Amino acid sequence: MSEVIVVTSGKGGVGKTTSTANIGAGLARMNKKVVLIDTDIGLRNLDVVMGLENRIIYNLVDVVEGNCRVKQALIRDKHYPGLYLLPSAQTRDKSAVSPEQMIKLVDSLTQIFDYVVLDCPAGIEQGFRNATAAAQRAIVVTTPEVSAIRDADRIIGLLQAGGIKKIDLIVNRVRVDMVKRGEMMSVEDVLDILAVNLIGAIPDEESVVIAANHGESVVGSDTLSGQAYMNIARRITGETVPLIDLESGATLLHRVVSLFRRK
Amino acid sequence: MKSDQNRYTRTSGRIAKTRTKLTIASDRLDCNQAEMTQMQEEVVNILSKYLNLDSELFDIRIEIINRTKRGVKDVKTIQIK
């Protein structure tokens, strides 16, 4: 049974696209067939984050308008044979696609893939409606900042009103040193305010930026953020994975446990 | 209400949390923050009319309790502690 997940946030620049790419890579590492759809028409970015920008021939709008078949527009990832990208159009705008067309497109993809992950544009206008129309569950990305949490709260309300039952939260760019000094809200503070299920917290690490610079995912690298995203992917599939203690990094116990888990 | 003098003794993380909570409450109730502050002051005035209160010893907070009903516009539960 396939699942359709939208990654959204309301506020821009909190890490939706990076999270989508890494969740996709994480699921693909678990041998799932995954397609990532960039729904940000006019401002496409997921292709660059994944390092696939020079392989684009057809895009989302071409598929919707019938200029090509879905399979012609799908781009296979460089590393994971089960991971595909459906890029967005750069020269069109949000009105080029309707929620009904998105639902039809996603329906055809669920026949082929285990997971369809939609990268939502910032804002709450048509782009948001397009991306959420076909989704069964949502992952809301926020950072420990007043503005991002406020927008996340608004988005959660809209998702619930839109009938999306399962909503999970990623708290991105957590700086443990600042939280310790009391100069940043902790993950617990954010959860206290938003009261949704936490699916993972990502530390603010250089490795995420460096990976994106190369057009690679952090998942699979020996970094705390890479592990955190991998754990999110495993939780998506229904596994119970304990949260990483961001402060101590992967503890000795954690390392031993993960050693045994690797079959 | 906590005043600005605490701005320098409290950490910025605490301040951020308080501000976020206030902003979200104000967004959800569609009631601006000045009105909410005024409402809190009026509540204190009414309470002290009937009860012998020491204003230093208590704190009025507005919290939205009915979280599961978010998105439904007509359900707004306010708890005043």
Image: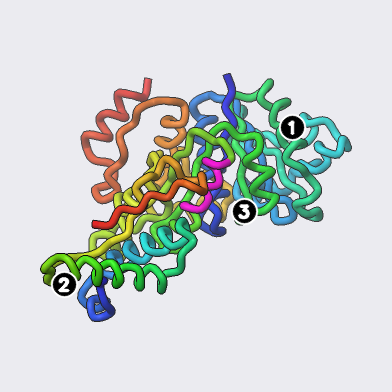
Which of the chains bears the disc numbered 1? A
User: Residue drawn 61% across and 44% down?
Assistant: A119
The stretch in magenta equals A153-161
Quarter of the figure that contains the N terminus of chain B: bottom left
Type of secondary structure dominating the magenta stretch:
helix
Q: Amino acid at mark 1?
A: Leu
Q: Nearer the viewer, residue B78 or A155?
A: B78
Residue named by callout 1: A105
Q: Secondary structure at mark 1?
A: helix
Left or right, A152 with reference to A108: left
Judge whether residue B13 can be spotted in this image. yes
User: Residue drawn 70% across and 48% down?
Assistant: A53
User: Residue drawn 46% across and 26% down?
Assistant: A237
> Within 10 Å of the Cα at label 3, are there few (<14), some (14-19), or many (20+) other Cα atoms?
some
Mark pair 1, 2: CA separation: 61 Å
Q: Quadrant of residue A235?
A: top left
Left or right, A192 with reference to A29: left
Given this view, does label 1 or label 2 mark the residue nearer the observer? Answer: 2
User: Residue drawn 73% across and 26% down?
Assistant: A108
Given this view, does label 1 or label 3 mark the residue nearer the observer? Answer: 3
Residue named by callout 2: B55
Q: Amino acid at mark 3?
A: Ile
To the question of a shared chain for discs 1 and 2, the answer is: no
- Image coordinates for residue A6, horizontal then vertical, percent: 58, 40
- Image coordinates for residue B53, horizontal then vertical, percent: 13, 69
Q: Specify which label sits upstream in the sequence, 1 or 3.
A: 1
- Image coordinates for residue A64, horizontal then vertical, percent: 81, 38
Residue farthest to the bottom, as pictured: B5
Residue named by callout 3: A124
Q: Quadrant of residue A36?
A: top right
- Image coordinates for residue A207, horizontal then vertical, percent: 44, 53
Which of the chains bears the disc numbered 3? A
